[in-house]
Image (cartoon, grey):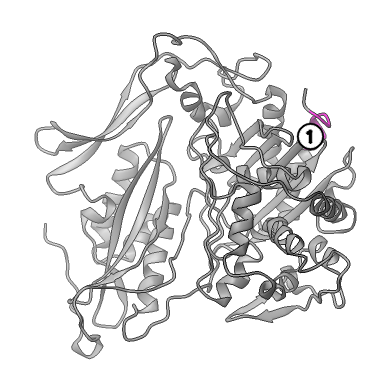
Amino acid sequence: MPDTQFPTPAARRRPRGGVRAVAAVAVVLALAAGGSYAAGLGPFARGDDGPDPAAMKQARAFLDDWAAGRLPSAAGRTTRPDTAQDVLRSFTAGLDIGKPGLTAKGEPEEAEDGTLTVPFTARMPIGGLGTWTYESALPLREDEDGGWKVDWRLSLVHPRLSGTEKFRLVREETTPPKVTDRHGTSLADGSYPSLTPLLGRIAGGSGGGPRGAVELIDRTTGETVRTEASFGEEPDPATAGEPVRTTLDADWQSAAEKALGEAGGKNAALVALRVDNGEILALANSPATGFNRAASGTYAPGSTWKIVTSSALLLKGAVRPDDVVDCPKYLTVGKEFHNVETSEHPGATFRKDFTESCNTAFISLRGKLDDGELGEVARTYFGVGQEWHVGIPTYDGSVPAPKDETEKAASMIGQGRVQANPLIMASVTATAVSGEFHQPSLTAGNEDRTRTEPLPDGVVTQLRDMLRATVTDGTARSLAGLPGEVGAKTGTAEVSDDQDNNGWLVAHRGNVAVAVVVEEGVTGGGSAGPVVHGLLSAVPDDPA
């Protein structure tokens, strides 16, 4: 079946110079797995060698729609809407794929015929097995009206999908996994919905995990051409049938599952871990089935990231909590930044900027840090971006050096290309209040390749003071009535022009640090606050 081609009008043709890589700011879209990008940050600028921003916008919109399940809208952005919609629907349904994660990355390429190719990574969560990850690319073509369409072809869904070959999901029959909490309580009885998709990964080689594969097959004969992805491990005869003990606490896990009900049906995730050793007490997702947002999601952490930014500034002596750092409504750095609800605090101290989560004040301090310094502090003191071995697959964060001043401004407030998830931010909080990073763990005996340095005691004291003040006098006042000395930081993270902001809240009490994200929760205090309050109201100050 031939693909429809849209001719490029001669009047719109750009100078040719062979296939050339277009130097551009990498656009990161973590859709479905908690996807986010800061609208307007680090835009592709069109020049003699640059792609049309409208083409990039169309590519982003297609991936956004596909990931969110808006298949008619995604298909409408292609040159063959009817075919595209049928294929996108059958591809995910036939392989039991949940909400995909689609990340446009790398440098787009422009060919002689005007076609623009945008590479992307696809993360396809397959129910009960794991995530199938592969690379593909979006071809875009300019039509006669000057608009852009995704030039539909089967290979953009997956490079090996074709008119002669397709994919098939095969599952193997396995015994139910045996997994317990830290005290020996079984976690495999269905009472902890968020854990059900993870039990096989936790069980690993014990013989209790589900196994299966995605196979490429001949459309006519049904014969297997190749195994595209395999899930699960063959059981180790020495340990087969033995239960795997985790660091989880059944009471905390149950409370976490219930607390996510406060998210109002929105996609959300929660992690609670011990401050002293990084052991994970609870890990919950809403919805409970499918993608593990809590540990594998890729989100802009928003203002919860100001914990790391504050650490970088305090480490350098660039600011002190009592220094006056004005908080205006707006600040323009390539684009206009503002505070939530366009609030302002004239003559505020840095402590006040932190407790009221003032974006403009933090952005105004960007010149105090070198371009790569924020990422270096995140890596050196908080372990963010290093390789973690937790006991299940995780995304371990990214803080790339900013490409321009606008992106540097955005990174100061946890936007731009800064990426994290609740596991990372719970760990960041634990490190901030203890001064020492501990690789998070869900099972015992995991390899630890991380290398970090402790935060100075003076910086830890200042961070704890500001986190506590955020509860007593700042944006996390909703936690003030909880027993114990609670410290917290709220966060609001931009996603896109047509989506509400994600809401974040991190907190610590006693020997526990917690992080929650609520997709499209609008504000952290309003959406994630009730979840954290619900959890900490239901559990003791310190776990046993």
State the image coordinates of residue 440 (x, y, percent, origin top left). Answer: 62, 36
Figure check: 248 above or below 77? above
The answer, for residue 73, to whether it is visible in the render is no
State the image coordinates of residue 531 (x, y, percent, origin top left). Answer: 72, 43
| Nearer to the camera, 189 or 116 | 116
Range of magenta residues: 536-542
Q: Which residue is mark 1?
A: 511
The answer, for residue 441, to whether it is visible in the render is yes
State the image coordinates of residue 237 (x, y, percent, origin top left). Answer: 39, 9
Identify which residue is drawn at 72% across, 68% down.
340
Q: Residues within 10 Å of mark 1 (few under 14, many from 20)?
A: some
Amino acid type, label 1: Asn
Identify which residue is drawn at 66% across, 43% down.
427
Identify which residue is drawn at 38% across, 26% down.
232
Identify which residue is drawn at 59% across, 19% down.
187
| Nearer to the camera, 254 or 515 | 515
| Nearer to the camera, 319 or 521 | 319
Quarter of the N terminus within the rendering: bottom left
Quarter of the C terminus within the rendering: top right
Instruction: Please identify the quarter of the rendering in which residue 244 is found.
Output: top right
